[in-house]
Image (cartoon, rainbow, N blue to C red):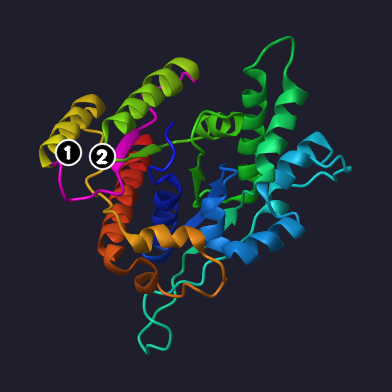
Amino acid sequence: MKGGVGKSTTTMMLADTLSLHHEKRVLIVDCDPQANCSQMVLSYEGLKEAKASHKTLASWIESLIGRSIYGEKMQRYQAGQTICYDVSELTNFKPGWFNQNPSEGRLSIWPSIPDSRFAELMFDAEHVQNGDLEHPRRVLAQEISRGLKEALTDEEIAIFDCPPGFSTLAQAALLNADFILSPLNVDFVSLWSLKTFWNQGLSDTLKISDRVPRYAMFTMVRNSGGREERMRLRQELSAFANGQRIRAEVSFSVQGLRMATRIAPDSQRSFNEKYGSLRGTVRALGDEVAELISSQKESEN
């Protein structure tokens, strides 16, 4: 529910670790019209190219309606036609090191652009029926589910990066989720927002069962000042989440903030260069989530 808690940064960290170190085939679905995660992955220049070639989530949504937000007639696109595949060139080691081993994993993205918000509003208007405000999210959830089944294999992992708030697109993404991870800052308003999101959003509004695991984690943690307050907030989170809390905590880092302003496509080449002092924490976060996903699949089988 709250902006600035690290949703896009956490998405990027997980996608890099799962694809590079765990050699998974990962697709980021960027549902946030701010497009921070899309810029982190593609760079600003790459994102402009994606829009020009209709490889964005906005183009796909517009094609469901049959027209663009500018009034132009749109052809129908399959989901796979609007996804940018194999977009990461990160390596484990610095370029030129003789012992670098390319990962068997891959990272793709269904990118967002600012136009996505207006495409979503058009979709809402198109699908409201007899005052049924829930109908658009149900239809969009079905379309996303169908699109991902067409575009992905069973082995691939889709990570939805949701925007702040509770938009139709965010709700449709959550209805397709097998696992929900909620980042929050170490402050009480963030915790309040988390409680509201889990209780009113997931349980009461979307009727998402407790069988869908939900976890919380702290990001942008500062270790200076307010020690007692941080301890009390951690205790409150543990009591509310009933143990469903990620152990890894991402510290505040200027390098982490810099990821969101990536301009050039070739500005990030290795995992260590990209994450710097955060690389150990990022790796630990990915390892922990990979273990939880694996355990969930085993229990389902």
x then y, percent, for residue 112: 62, 48
**Residue corresponding to mark 2:** 186
Query: Image point 32% across, 69% down: which residue?
Result: 276
On whether residue 137 falls in the magenta region, the answer is no
Q: Amino acid at mark 1?
A: Arg
Q: What x and y, as percent, mark residue 139?
A: 67, 26
**Which corner quadrant holds the N terminus?**
top left
Q: Which of the pair 276/95 is nearer the observer? A: 276
Instruction: Identify the secondary structure beneath mark 1.
Output: helix
Q: Residue at x 35, y 66 (%)?
A: 275
Q: Residue furthest front?
A: 225
Distance between mark 1 and mark 2 Cα atoms: 6 Å
Whichever of labels 1 and 2 marks the residue nearer the N terminus, that label is 2
In the image, farthest residue toward the right: 73
Query: What residue would you read off at disc 1?
Result: 230
Q: Main secondary structure of the magenta part?
A: loop
Q: Secondary structure at mark 2?
A: loop
- Residue 230's place in the image compared with 221, above or below, is above
- Span of residues in magenta: 206-226
Residue 61 on image: x %, y %? 72, 39
